[in-house]
Image (cartoon, helix red, strand yellow):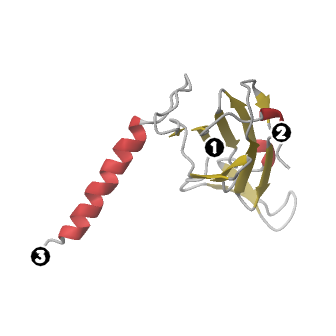
Amino acid sequence: MARNPFEEMRRTLERLSEQFERQFEGGEGGETAPAGVSGSAFGTVSVDIAESDDAYEVTADLPGFEPEDIDLSVHDDVLHVEARSESESETEATGAGEGEGEEERSVIRKERSTRSIRRQIRLPGPVDEAGAEAEYQNGVLTVTLPKAEGEETHSIEIR
């Protein structure tokens, strides 16, 4: 069977992409990557950043989280996004009714577990942190940050 050079190139590009992402991941100290967007050792999330005349809009895919699982803050023109979700227990009871007939079962494979995501996004310019708004709908977080001067830290409430 002949080797597929395109498949080899795809695998090489995936490895390079993973290495690049790891290089720019922020650690516990919260460094930000020169490119302006970084993930963390916990997990990564993809974002889009759009700019209008009066605001920046950051959109992030955070499927599987609830609004109360997500923490947002802005400091020194960096948007900090952190999300954490808990998993179900290792074993659970199943059966037709309460007490009698219930049987305990063991989980054979557990791929769903606690997930944590931390992302820092350097914004293109100063923003009015107090005027920031966030909306979370169907696993998509949208944060609108009005352009302004100042560098205070503010929490952002998710609607």
Residue bearing the label numbered 3: 2
Image quarter hosting the N terminus? bottom left
Q: Amino acid at mark 3?
A: Ala
Q: Earlier in the sequence, mark 1 or mark 2?
A: 1
Residue farthest to the front, as pictured: 53
Q: Which is nearer the N-term, disc 1 or disc 3?
A: 3
Residue 97 in the image: above or below residue 80: below
Counting from the top left corner in percent of width and height, residue 154 is at 79, 29
In-image side of 111 versus 18 (left or right): right
- Tell me which residue sits at (70%, 57%) in the image: 140
Q: Residue 33: percent from the left, percent from the top?
A: 48, 34
Dot 2 surroundings within 10 Å: few (below 14), some, or many (20 or more)?
few
Q: CA distance from mark 1 to mark 2?
A: 32 Å
**Residue at the disc numbered 1:** 114
Query: Circle 2 sits in a helix, a strand or a loop, which is it?
Result: helix
Residue 61 sits above or below residue 82 on the image: below
Compute the Cα span from label 1 to label 3: 43 Å
Q: Which residue is mark 2?
A: 131
Q: Nearer the viewer, residue 90 or 24?
A: 24
Please name the residue shown 37% across and 43% down the image: 20
Q: Residue at x 55, y 38 (%)?
A: 42
Q: Which percent across, then down, holds residue 146?
A: 76, 42
